[in-house]
Amino acid sequence: MILDETDRELITSLRRDARQSLRTISKRTGASVPTLSSKLQKLIEVGAIKKFSVLLDSATFGLRDYLVEISYKPKHLRDLEKFSDRFTHCVVTQDSRIVGIFTGTEKEIVSLYSEISSAGGVDRIAVTPTISYTVNNERPNIESGYRISISCNLCGRDITSSPVTLRYRGVTKYFCCTSCRKLFVAEHQGIDRK
């Protein structure tokens, strides 16, 4: 899927403020609300937009932000991935580190530290209270002409040409070839009849 100018404007608008209505974006961009709605749904379905979220001011709730860095033995990543949902932002690096922002009380960060320490494969944990951090939703710039990589819903291969599609339970499924589409239909006919 190649992004056009309307896709780019839609993404840029939502990154600035995901609460704004499609009608507001339509007035600014000149694209119709149904066109924006269709494009937004497709961007969500192919995984280009993962979620819409709220950024809280931790101090308002009496909480503090901590930068947590976990160095681990590579074969233990699966054991440590369970902690990633405890972070507001989390990155797993190629050099066997998990770096995240944890928001909570001092008691909660001590508890998390203890849990991570007792997990297998941890080489080192560093916890640093933050003074502040900024989420810059303006970066990176998304330009029209960017290609969104889509994986086949059956075999997982990257789709390099026009995908074969199928509407299934209200969601568009993408396939690399008609064979994968037929196999998907065959596999799901039995499930749908039960």
Image: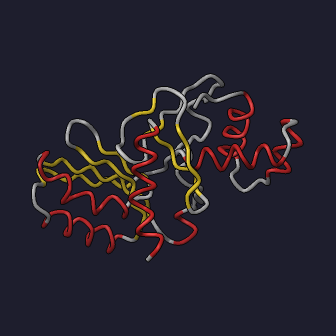
Report the colour scheme: secondary structure
Q: Position of residue 83 (x, y in %)?
A: 29, 62
Q: Is 17 on the left-hand or right-hand side of 187? A: right
Q: Is 79 on the left-hand or right-hand side of 32? A: left
- Picture residue at 57% right of the left edge, 62% below the top: 56
- Picture residue at 23% right of the left edge, 65% below the top: 113
Q: Is 11 on the left-hand or right-hand side of 124? A: right
**Which image quarter is the C terminus in?**
bottom left
Report the front residue among 92 and 104: 92
- Toward which corner of the image does residue 13 lie, by quadrant? top right
The answer to whether residue 87 is above or below residue 40 is below
Q: Position of residue 28 (x, y in %)?
A: 86, 39
Q: Position of residue 104 (x, y in %)?
A: 41, 68
- Picture residue at 18% right of the left edge, 60% below the top: 79
The answer to whether residue 182 is above or below residue 119 is above
Q: Position of residue 50 (x, y in %)?
A: 52, 50
